[in-house]
Image (cartoon, rainbow, N blue to C red):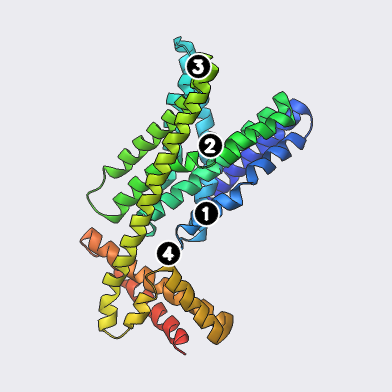
Amino acid sequence: MLVGATLAGAVVLVGIVGGSFAYAGTVVPALLALLFAAIPLPALVGGVLLIDRLEPEPLPELALAFLWGAGGAIMLASTANGFGFTTLALSGVGAVDYMTATVVAPITEEVLKGALLLLYLRVRRHHLDSVTDGVMYAALVALGFAATENATYYLDAALTDGLGALGTVFVLRGLISPLAHPIFTSMTGIGVALAATRRGRAWAPPVGLVLAMGLHGLWNGLVGRGELTGRPDDSFTGLLLAYVVLFVVLIGLIAVLVVDRRRLVAQLRTHLAPYVLSGMLRPDEVEGLTTMRARKQVRAAQKARHGAAGERAARRFQQAATDLALLHRRVDADGRIPAGAETERQHLVTQLALARTEVSR
């Protein structure tokens, strides 16, 4: 599947470059479009990864999330949106562009972005340990989707109205509203994470998906209201309201992540308590795991004592202890011991003991 997503992304990018030859006879607009689409990505992707510093996810799965958004999801969504547009036009519905943007696109795009999250829920459930994980995977899918979508808008602007128009579209899409898609799809991510962390929450993914569609449709409807009515005042009012809604949802999302982090930290203490009683861990070692500041201080101390090797050992110790606590959390949430849980626990205990030996030297 990773190979498929990578190929899908490559096909989309080749299509963008090919489009520049077909319409303008030069590759320059396509290269500029790709460059402008890539400019915000390091900061955006880096910011998303920072929210999961407590328990970093596997790099291949993070890459797959981004590539699915940038390749497969947007290719299928473009096809579906085109079909929806044609269907609306043939049915005689008025304001076809507006209806496509506010009804068709939110449904097709959020379903396709969320498809990978639902797949992870089925085959990688053990990596969805918290709401934070769901939001992070959702945001990466959405950032990939937005990057390719933005590149197509930039290319169209450059080919239609020149490079000045490309700059204007870049400001509007790349700088002013880069978090729109991640915020929409985060609703699906939260729903998937809720279902993954506790049994009996099969309702959560569909509810999250509907919220994602609703926010997406509301945003598109407000932003495009001026074009629908032809009144400049409606354009300004719609855009202002759209940003107010997005800002309020963003603040709520940040609050959810903060609460989720605090709850996870408290659960680390709870689930590692038996290992303190058994003597495998000391109380101060557990406390050193429960805040990002404490973790950083432990790594810095080990680096000062043993150099880079000590810092790496401290990271392995922290990761093994965190994964061990989260394993116990999953077992408690499910109310049963999943297949392979004891084998995973023994592996983590071994890794923890080995890392602890290095850290305690």
Which badge, 1 or 2, is on the more N-terminal residue?
1
In this orientation, does residue 130 appear? no
Q: Is residue 239 above or below residue 227?
A: below
* Disc 3 to disc 2, C-alpha distance: 25 Å
* Camera-nearest label, 4 or 2: 4
Question: Is residue 162 placed above or below 324 in the rendered structure?
Answer: above
Q: Which residue is mark 3?
A: 228
Residue 168, percent across and down?
66, 32
Identify the mark at residue 74; answer none if there is no mark: 2
Q: Amino acid at mark 1?
A: Gly
Q: What residue does disc 4 label?
A: 55
Left or right of residue 263: residue 45: right
Residue furthest out toward the bottom: 361
Name the N-terminal-most of marks 1 and 3: 1
**What residue is shown with label 1?**
47
The answer, for residue 78, to whether it is visible in the render is: yes
Of the two numbered discs 1 and 2 in the rendering, the one whose residue sits closer to the viewer = 1
